[in-house]
Amino acid sequence: MRGNTAIWTAAVVSAALTAALGTAGEASAATKTLVVAVDGDDAAPGTLTRPLRTIQKAVDLAAPGDTIAVRGGTYALTDNITIATSGTASQPITLTSYRGERVVVDGEQLPASHTPVGGSIPRAERGAIHQEASYWRISGLEIVNGPYGVYCDGCDGNVFSHLSTHDNYESGFQLQGASSGNLILNLDSYLNRDPRKNGESADGLAVKEGSGTGNVVRGARLWNNVDDGFDAWKFTSPILIENSVAYGNGFNRWNFPDFAGDGNGFKLGGGTPAPAAAHTVRGSVAFENAAHGFTDNGNPGALALSHDSAYANAGTGFDADVSGGTATLGADLSVADGKAAALGSSTVSKGNSWDLGGTWNASSVLSTNPAPLTGPRAADGSLPSAPSFLVPRNGADIGARF
């Protein structure tokens, strides 16, 4: 638990469902659990034996404290799922897969998924899941082919856990607007692209164009997206990112003409002018991205990067050279990047690999093989163990550990 925000794992959700549904398989008197199934009926009461048909119907019926349990299957949308009713801090609303069953929310049929080149997506149509509400717990869903996967604007106190957002036609997950106290936990977001912009803006995860304190990203893997892995463009408040991974971003896998993808692992700001936001990144790794591993992108704020690793990025491992920038880098590791670090006159750099001297290359670490880290997650949704990946052979306490 961090910042009084509860972390709901798959095991916790399963236990909650068991308590709510009871041994008879129906909702207990103490809670209202709405069950959804691909063979259900929206005129049904939403019990395990008589489930609803659409997630939207369950969302419309849900009140603070309720749980929506979605049975396995593919839910092909003809209109996006719109979440407009908030829970409360003490009674959040839960939307989750039923006992770990595979639930796929497919936005391929949504008109906004196929916005033409140069077109814009109307705000209400952004996201296979479009949320403008607070105090939800959303977990265990796979969201594909949407005009954004999850789009949350003006959202407070939510927990998004163990989601997979991939092959969407914009960013896999975007949080923006006045949004505070949200936890994005154990997100996998990959192969998101934006044909309408030739790769200019589809990131794995974007927390951008807004403000709000207490937003945390933990345990994310963001890979092979057309633009950046993580993007904090024009977000004015501090974001905490920890134990996260970004790789393979910014390559034109879709043969877009006039390709415009940036290709940073973690982009920590931007705008004209870029706001000064004191984002923190720790225990994270960026590798094999088309541009930089970690970049301030013009953010002059008090960025804090510690125990992070960059490997084989085409640009700079750690780019923190904006004029007047006040970033602090400590115990970070760069191996085989185009350039280890770019530092401004006000950047504080202490105990990093480039400060320690010597040559830092593939032979300087126990392993450069990312396969363990990119494999299946643990049962609780956490990242798999990769105890040798980018760990210095000389025992130096620098870089991330997995």
Image (spheres, rainbow, N blue to C red):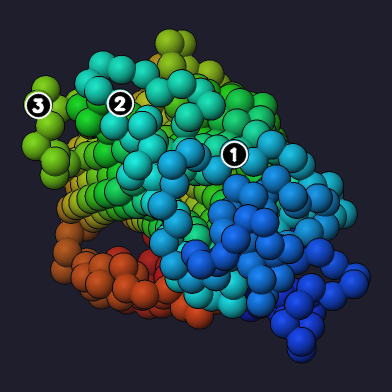
Question: Is 260 on the left or on the right of 112, as rendered?
Answer: left
Q: Residue 177: give x, y in percent of width and height.
A: 61, 26
Please identify the residue farthest to the front as the structure is shown.
Answer: 43
Residue 29, compared with residue 96, is above or below; it is below
Q: Please give the name of the residue rendered at 14% of the width and 27% of the height, measured from the top-left corner.
A: 259
Sequence-wise first label, 1 or 2: 1
Q: Residue 170: give x, y in percent of width and height.
A: 35, 36
Q: Please give the name of the residue rendered at 69% of the width and 36% of the height, measured from the top-left corner.
A: 84
Crowding at dot 3, Cα within 10 Å, few <14 / some 14-19 / many 20+, comes out as few
Question: Is 156 on the left or on the right of 253, as rendered?
Answer: right
Q: Which of marks 2 and 3 is in front?
A: 2
Residue 378, compared with residue 160, is above or below; it is below
Q: Mark 3 points at which residue?
A: 257
Sequence-wise first label, 2 or 3: 2
Crowding at dot 2, Cα within 10 Å, few <14 / some 14-19 / many 20+, comes out as some
Q: Residue 134: give x, y in percent of width and height.
A: 73, 41
Quadrant in which the N terminus is drawn: bottom right
Kindly report the distance in space between the C-alpha atoms of the residues bearing marks 1 and 2: 19 Å
